[in-house]
Image (tube, rainbow, N blue to C red):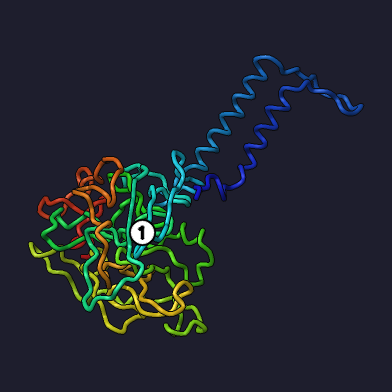
Amino acid sequence: MTAHVGKNLPDPPRFIAVAMMTATHASIKSRPVDRQPHPPTKEITGMSSLRYALAACSLLLVATSVLAHPGPGGHQHGQAHRDQDNEVSIVTRGNYRYITANGIPDHQHGRFPNRGNPNRIAPQRYTFRVPLQPRMNEEFRSAMGQPFGVALNGVPFDPGTAEFWNRDRRSGWNYEALSGKINLGLDASNAHVQPTGAYHYHGMPTGLIAKLGDEKKMVLVGYAADGFPIYALHGHAEPNDAESDVVRLRSSYRLKKGSRPGGRGGPGGRYDGTFVQDWEFVPGAGDLDEANGRVGVTPEYPEGTYYYVVTNEFPFIPRLYRGTPDESFARRGPGRGPGSGGRRGRRPPPFGGPGVQGRGGRPGPPGGFPPPSERDR
């Protein structure tokens, strides 16, 4: 699989063409084209022609920098990883499916480093393994602390963040990457980069889905660490009827009512999705279970299977397993990605950035936002 560079770039602005035509015209001796008298013309050659050409080139460079300016979240249209192409292999041997990849996305991605993410994309050496016949457990198992799964292009699904209220993991208040309340430098595919250089998805992999096909159908986007398939957004209206309409599936998580504990016990403020702990599972509120999955038929599994769904609302990427995750997805030490390889990088900027503090002199959340307890007043 090969990364595509330069697609969907806008046409050059008209003023570039005008400038280039002006420079070209300036290097040609002016001549009268009819019998009417003309003012004296000046032949522009030598250094004068060179000055015009240099001026046109300057305009071209300015226009190019304007086109390359990244949009919100560091996304830059037409940018792909230029150092190395996407490499991924998915094979089955015995009772397992093996996914070997370098972790480079096969679609356009944002500019990294950027204001919210100081890390640069680097090739990885991933070797994941998932069972071909996964089994559902009676109890759900937490998926936090490791990648939930891997996409078909070899990029991990990894929804968790390392950002906690007051920079204290023991507080129990973990910032949600897709809350819109903090800036983690995510691109248009809801992805950014770990200090190891590992590009990974925190939510809907829009660039991947666009390459795989019709986003209004059931689209297989990857496999969870326990072996069950992962689909994006859609499923059949009747889970076990392949002839029923394909509809958008809804998460069953809802925001809690009321306010968080304040003082030393919590950040205070109303439950608004800033933290993972702002959400709770409400049985029957949507189409999916606690792991954002369900049992049903799919194009790849016409006899039916348990499958996970990536949704546009919390939890976005599932935070629980229904099966048993393979150990190949376990992290290899602090700050290291799954599998092996990669390089060391820098951690994200300290919470709040320079000079930004929360109540009582405590650090505020990343991205310069005030503490939720103060923002919600």
Residue at 25% across, 77% down: 281
> Which amino acid, by three-letter code, is at mark 1?
Val
Q: Work out whether residue 13 or residue 139 is closer to the camera in this orientation and state it.
A: 139
Q: How many marks?
A: 1
Q: Return the x and y of residue 228 as percentages of the image width and height.
A: 35, 69
Is residue 62 rendered to the left or right of residue 95?
Answer: right
**Taking 228 as reference, is 44 above or below it?**
above
Q: Return the x and y of residue 26 as percentages of the image width and height.
A: 71, 24
Circle 1 — which element? strand
Q: Work out whether residue 151 or residue 358 is closer to the camera in this orientation and state it.
A: 151
**Taking 45 as reference, is 288 above or below it?**
below
In this view, the residue farthest toward the left is: 264
| The C terminus lies in quadrant | bottom left
Q: Return the x and y of residue 136 as percentages of the image width and height.
A: 28, 76
Residue at 53% across, 35% down: 62
In this view, the residue farthest toward the top is: 46
Residue at 79% across, 23% down: 30
Q: Name the residue beneath numbered marker 1.
A: 150
Residue at 76% across, 22% down: 28
Q: Work out whether residue 222 or residue 367 is closer to the camera in this orientation and state it.
A: 222
In this view, the residue farthest toward the right is: 35
Q: Return the x and y of residue 120 as percentages of the image width and height.
A: 35, 42
**Taking 308 as reference, is 186 above or below it?**
above
Is residue 62 rendered to the left or right of residue 168?
Answer: right
Q: Work out whether residue 315 or residue 68 is closer to the camera in this orientation and state it.
A: 315
